[in-house]
Structure formats: structure tokens, C-alpha cells
Image (spheres, grey):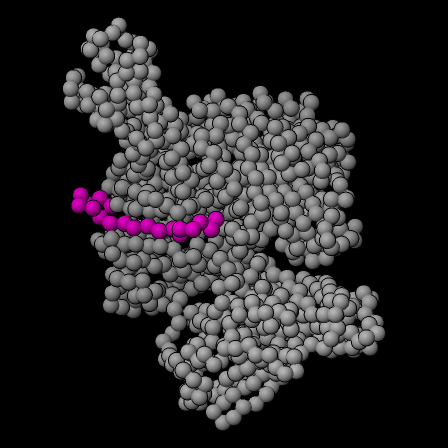
Amino acid sequence: MKPIQFDYYAPTSVDEGLDKLTELGYDGKVLAGGQSLIAAMNFRMARPAALVDLNRIPELAYIKPTDDGGLAIGTMTRVRRVEQDAEVAKRFPLLREVAQFIGHAQVRTRGTFGGAIAHADPAGQLPAISMAMNANLLVCSKTGERWVNATDFIFGPFMTVLEPQEMLAEVVLPPNPPRTGSVYKQVSRQKGGYAQAAVIAIMTLDEAGACQNVRLVMMSVGETPIVSEKAVEILVGQKPSEQAFKAVAEAVVTGEIDPATDLHATADYRRQLVRVLVVRALTEACERASKGG
Amino acid sequence: MLIAKVLHSPVAHARIKNIDVSKAKSLPGVAAVLTYKDLPRVVYATAGQSDPMPGPLDTFSLDNKVRFVGDRVAFVAAETEEIANQALKLINVEYEELPFIIDPRSSMSDGAVKIHDEPEYVVHDLSDPNKNVAAAIRIDIGDLDNGFSEADQIIEAEYKVPKVHQAHIEPHVSISYWDENDRLVIRTSTQVPFHVRRILAPVLGLPMKRIRVIKPRIGGGFGSKQEVLIEDVVAHLTIATKRPVRYEYTREEEFIAARSRHPMIIKLKTGVKNDGTITANEMYALSDTGAYGCHALTVTGNTGHKAMALYTGDGKYRKAPNIRFYADIVYTNTPPSGAYRGYGAPQGFWAVERHMETIAAKLGMDPIQFRLKNCLRAGEIHPFSIAWSEGREPKPEYIQTIGIEQCVHQGKSAIGWDQKYGKQEWRDSTDKPYLKRGIGMALMMHGTAIAYLDMGGASIKMNEDGSFNLLVGATDLGTGSDTVLTQMAAEVLGVPVDDFIVYSSDTDFTPFDKGAYASSTTYISGAATTHAAAKVAERIRVRAAMILNDRTDGAPVKPDEIILKDRRAHASDGRAVTYSEIGHHSLHHKDQEQIMAVASYVSPVSPPPFAAQFAEIVMDIETGQVKVEKLVMAVDAGRIVNPVTASGQIEGGMTQALGYAVCEEMTYDDKGAPVERDLVDYHIFRADEMPELETIFVETFESSHPFGVKAVAEIPLDGVAPAVANAIYNASGAMLYENPATPDRVWKALQKQKIN
């Protein structure tokens, strides 16, 4: 199918873009890489009256190291660039690992880092990753800017706190402390396909080898990515063990996720996947952390 | 040219109470809107099969009733596709919804709604529309009860196979127009142009001689185009508008309103002696034909005819096997099943080859030894040949060539069976404790054409320059049959294939051929072509002798001592005449004649190809994910005419069969609406996902054919799914009774395995 009729604007600066978004209000929709939005429009599931295309604003695409050892990534940075960037590989090897699961090379070449987060697809990797990495998001509008933590940014499937006149401008990833290991585990029906379930584990060990901090995020098993509180409760301050990881998996499966049955998998099978993937992800994250991350 | 569109039913079962097309008709650019009220009510069957139709007549071009979500409600022809689609939306239909049946297990229940209550319904053999039975099969060979009484153990199980889709690249597409002689021309992407003409004539109310069907180059069919599926739509609209009309299915229409593989529930009961001798083998198949009975009898007949024929038993049972094959092919309110490459055999072999694995395990026997002990041998009779022939008179067929032991031997060696099967260190030789390797196999047999029924014709005409026109009715649907048939003719006539201008297939210009199905073209149409070439060769020898004897520069030459080679006719004394000389001489110079011959062929036998399929997998025993790492298929398809196209058939077939094994499945919601409607949700294997494939041809010479060939086209669909499931059993002990082996299903089987 083809999309319904829509107006199209291509601002060449952030200010011009924000002007346009303010003017359009609820009729406007930001076009970034278009890898989800255009498909949704072609199926007529999305029917924006106007698109504001950010692709002509070069200043929105960058990867900059931050002073504290983290990274700031401009919203229009292509996923492929993040995947191939040497600084990203050094500071956040997880990003390179996860990028390979995002669609195919063509999709990543066009798709943007910020666009994927703002789209807030519950089956998308980057919204989940931003939550797992505790990212801070810079949200701009004509009247000012505000910082929102990734966990507060997404509140439902395809739903974020972005107001129609706002755009997501930058994603700031705080640095990993020493002895941090991170892992992404996904199961899908086929290569490049939707995740039936996925788990992200980021674990930091203290000098004595106990768990100092852990972030465990589940994806495709609820309306949004799910950050586990049980993992923190069970693991922090404890020596990591297979038994503890299994306890986390059980707690997550019984109390924290709410998988649905759909074309891709049954709810029961998704629970089993989470049960298995949580243990595997935590085990591997712990191994990596103990090797220095 | 007008563009046609069809309004498809949104409900599974309903009578059309009222249909108002006035708004659609008045839309500018709409040339015609047709409903059941506009067409003569002619009952027919859409299956592209020879006369008489081996199945019930239960279909109308348009009816006052719809029987599945996707069934036809109205036809539209308009100036553009957009206008046609718009017109569909303007048709107002009031449906009187009826109870509907999705699960074939409830089709024959007392009080079930009758899907076919039309008075015009024409019963075939055991079909009974009052019980929603499109066809039924009752075949008894030997004495089953006696066979069971002689068994030490009786093993029973129930198996289930899904509906799957052919997924040919080119969708169904047809164009029709009136030509300058007031004849209706239909250009269509079909496997069966001659059946299209025969079947459509009464439906359109035209004498057959006023219809011409042309098959251009087509982009695949896999059985889906052995169906008169959309030609009637364009034809009715051309008749209504007097204008050319084109209709092309969308990919979604291919999923909701075409044909697919019959899903079946299969029960097997097998008696064995403790030494591994099968004493009796019984299959019952409940086959779901969907809303119409196209191919209902013959597909399910093939399930038994192929899969239940392979294992007759050992010893005295070889001469007197005890086999029963019963089947009920029932209507449901789902899209019709039909012909799909393999034609019933993949369903049968899934069940039989899983069952054989189970029995071997129960007996503690090597699964390959157990199979070979009981399987057919050369010189034995095809057990079904004396019991059943799709309702025609059965005539005995003896197996001449059977390379199955060599297939097993070479296949085992290629996949490294002896180093892997039953070796725990190999099974566990992965980097993760939850990953296990497994290896499995299956044997299979198929058929080559339908004996005493399938006919192909070919004609060859010689031109002045020594080139030839080969006209064949055989339908190249992307299989390369044009090439292979030309190779055979070129071999007989001693010329390169480039000297042939081949044309297939056009009901006005080429001889009849029943079409591309039943693994028959290389064998049947190939024999016809070879015989036509032999007749032409005979005339070339006569003309060459005439020329040489007129020259008087040597001893007199007799035609039968002339050898045809390198575009020349060679006498034994070394003199030769070129084909160009012979061509000019025959057409212009002396005792002028057109060197031309036509031949046709129908076979008294259907020699089965045999094969051994091997699969190697690695699986995750915690998540149930299965990755197929390697497929090896060793095939006895007689002599191979063209190794490139033949191995292409095997590789392509294994690719489709792998989807049947692990991921392909068409499902319906509780209202009967198809869930999968595109190639995103319905996943077929992509090139970059394929495991390593290896094809081995074990060549035998089938003496019933001039070049010794048997079929190769369908057998690769038969064995991959059971071989993969057997490999899963080998890796993990998990027993699958239902395919495809999706992770969810494998995980459930693993849970069961743990409990047991």
C-alpha cells in the first residue's frame, strides 16, 4: 500500500525544525531514519498529517566522548555508524553486540539511534538498551530543553513523554565503572527477525568479587522493556552464583514480566526463554566483569 | 487493458442475502461488476487434471454462498487498479452467516453444518457432501488382521502435519482478449494450459475450439498453478466487456485465496516381529481439503500410494504384504488445499519415517538396518499397483530399478554417519553444555507420472538450414524442461541444442500435453520428444541416402547404415551430407517433402525414484531452538539428463522441505481468518539462512524410458522434515509428532521427554 497524503517539511537547522514542530502541533511527526515510521505509514497504521524530516540537519549526527568517560550520541546518528565506531567499541562493546540484531545492514544504515528510542517499539533493541545503560536523553523544544532518564522516557508501547513540539536531540550514555560486564541475548524466529524474547544484563563487581550493581532488562515480554528490581534485590552485595542467577530468573518470570501470545511465540514459551536467557546473560556478564569488563 | 479485482469474503461461511453493485458500477472507469446473478450456474472442479475429473464437482465461478474467508463474492474490471479497488469498496453485501467448521475433526460430526448443500454437486466415488466428505479411500492389501496377529509388538501413534504454501515468486496472473477471429485468447501463468481450455469451455459457455490458451514464460508454480484458479475471472470479464482484461494476484491473495498443501492428521499402526520384520502396516489419514474438493482424492491417495508402499515387510511378507490405507478427505471452511509439489507424499513420509524411527528404537535396532530390511526390492511388485489407481482399473507394476541401498551407502558416507550416529562425544562436542548435535535420516520413494493416464505430445520440424522446430505441449514452469527435452531430441539427431527452436506451450500450436505435474515431464514428454526425433532421424537417413546415391561417387548406401552426428548424415564409407543440404534438398530440390514428425507417449508404468535423506542439526535443549547444519540427499532418479538442472531441483526441493520441517505453517484464527498473509509472517528460508546442501545422484538405468530416466522433481520434498525430526530425537530424545519443529513445539516435546 501507499501512505495517505501528507505534508512534508525538511528543515536544515534544529531551530527551524523546532519552529515547524511547534507550528504543526499534533499534526506533525518527526521523520528520522524512517525504518519504522514509513513502513507503518505504508500500511496506514500511522497517518501523520505532516512529516518534519531531520535528515537535512547534519549537526544532529555525531558521536562525542564525554569528560566522565561516557558518550554523547546525536539523535540522527545512524545505527550503522554506532556499530562501526571505534570509540563506541572501546567504551560500550554491548552496543556493537546488540546492533547486529537490529534488522539488517540496510536497515541499520538508514535507521537512527535516537529515532529508534523515540519510536519506543516494545520489540526494539535500542529503547531497551537505553534503559539498561541508564541513558540520559536531551529533549529540546522552542521554549527550552530538559533531561529525561531513559527509564522515565518510555511509558507504554510506542509511547514516550515527548510532547508534539519536542524532539529528542541527544542520548548521553554514562560510563561503565571498572569491572563491568554487559551482555545481550536474543532469540528470534529468524536472523533479523523480531525478538521472541531478549535479555540485557549489565553487571558491576566490587573488588572482592561481589555484585556491586546490576541492571537486567527484558524485552518483547511486556508492553515496554522491563527493568528488573528483583535482580538488584537478590544479587547486589552477594557473591554471584548459578543458584542466585536461577533465583533471579524465577523471580523475573513469576513476578516481573507479562508476555503475550502472538504470531511469534506463545506466552509460555516466552517465559521459558526468559528463564533461560536471564541465567545465560547474568552468567556471561559476570564472567566478563570478572575479566575487567 | 482493463484491470480485474475480486471481492473476497470476509466471513467463513455465509449465504449472500443481498448484493448491491449499483454504486460500484456507476464509479467512473468501472467497466463491469459481476456477481453470481450475472453468470450461468455451471458446476465444475478447479483441479487441473485429466478427464474424467477424479473428484467431486463442487465449484462455481461465483456462487450465492461463500465457504471460506477469501472466497469469491464479485468480479470487477476497471480502467486502473486504483479504480478497481475503489469499486470493491462500493459493493454492498448482506451476509446471512452460517455456522462454520475450522477443525477437520468436527467435519463429519452429526449435526455439523453442510458446507456443500448445492443441488448441482456432482459426487465422485465415495464423496458424500451430506457428511462433508469430499473423497474417501479404502484400500486393503493382504490380510491386515492376520498380519497383526503374527506380530510380536504393535506400535501405534498419531501424527499431524500443517497446511503450507507454495510461495512461487511470480503470483497467479492471466490476461484474456478476443482475437481478430472472435476467439477468446487466455495468456496465463499455468502448469496445465490444455486442462485450462478443457475445463473452462463449459464454465464460459464457449465451444472449446473458440478458446486458445497460451503459456508464456512463467515464474514457478510448485503445483499451485496446476489449478484453473483465476483464468475464469478474466475470461468472464472479457466476455462481459469485450475488452482485454488482466488479473494478477497480490501476495496476500496467494495466501488467502489460492491453494496449498493438505493438512492431515495421520494415525499409524504397525505390527513387527522382534527380529524387525514388519507384518502389517495400517494408516488412517484425516485430510482437510478446505472449502472445495480440488485434488482431494488424488493428493491423499498419493499419501498412501507412496509412503505406505515403501515398506512391505521382510520374508514371506515381501510377496504378500498386509497393508491398509484408509482416508477421509473432509471439507472445512478454510481456503482450499490443492496440489503442492510432493502431492500428499510429504505428509505420508513425515508420519511413516517418524514411525519407523520409533519402532527401530523400541526394538533396539539400528534405524537404517530396520528400514532396509523391510523396504521394497528390485523385481517386486508395487503393492498399491494392484489395489488402487485413483478410481481407474489397477494394473500390476513391477519395480525395475531401485538404488536405495546405494543411496543409503553414499549418503551415510557423505554426512559421516558412522562417525556421528550414537556417538555421545560427537553429540556433546559443542562449546556449550545446552547445545547438542544430532543426526537423522529418512528413506522415501515417489512416482514418475501416472501410468496409463498421463500423455505428452511433441512435434519436430526440419528447416532448410538444418535447424529444427520443437513444439511441445509440456509446460516449462521454470524447471528447465524446455532445455532437457531439447537435449534429448538433439542427442537423437546429432546436433547441438542451439539448432533447436523450442516452443511450449500453446493449445493452438503445440501438441497436447497433460501439463507439468506428477513428476512426469522428463519421462513422458521426454519419451514423446525422443520418439518424434527418432521419426525425423529416419526421414533424414532416407533423404541422405537419396542424395548420396544420386551422386554416384561411391557404393550404394542404405538408410539404416547412416549415422547422424555433428549436423551431418554419415555413410559408412566416410561420405557425409550436411543437414543444410538435406534441408534444402527436401524442401526445394527433389521429391519435396516436409521432414516432420509428431509423437506422443503414455506409460504403462510409473517407475518410482528412491532416495535417502540425511540431516545434521545442532539444538538448544533449554530453548528448543533447532539449527539444521547440513542436508545430504542421495537420489536414484534413473539416468540424469542434465546434472545442473536436476541438482537444482533437489536443492530447491530440500529448501522448501526445510521450511516444512522447521518453520512454515498456515494458521487460521477462531473465525477462520488466515493469520499469515505475507512473506514476513510466513517465513520461507532465505539464501543466507540455508544450511550446507549436498546432492548425490545414484544413477540407475530405467529401461522403460529410451534414456533411462526417472523423476526428480518431487521426491526432495518428502524426506527433510522427518529426517530433521529424527535428528532432534537423536540429539535430545525428544519425540515430535507434529511438524514444523518450531522451538515452542520442540521445547514442549523436551518437557514431555523429561517427564517420561
Q: Is residue B149 left or right of residue B684?
A: right
Q: Is residue A86 left or right of residue A228?
A: left
Q: Confirm whether the magenta stretch covers residue B456.
A: no
Q: Nearer the viewer, residue B133 or A96?
A: A96
Asked if residue B114 can be seen in this view, the reply is no
Residue B609: % across, % down:
53, 31
Residue found at x 56% / y 62%: A193
Residue found at x 71% / y 38%: B419
Residue found at x 47% / y 34%: B643
Farthest residue toward the left? B589
Q: Confirm whether the magenta stretch covers residue B182.
A: yes
Q: Nearer the viewer, residue B623 or B483?
A: B483
Span of residues in magenta: B166-184
Asked if residue B405 can be seen in this view, the reply is yes
Q: Up-down: is A99 above or below B351?
A: below
Q: Up-down: is A58 above or below B562?
A: below
Residue found at x 59% / y 75%: A127
Farthest residue toward the bottom? A143
Residue B205: % across, % down:
28, 45
Residue A28: % across, % down:
43, 83
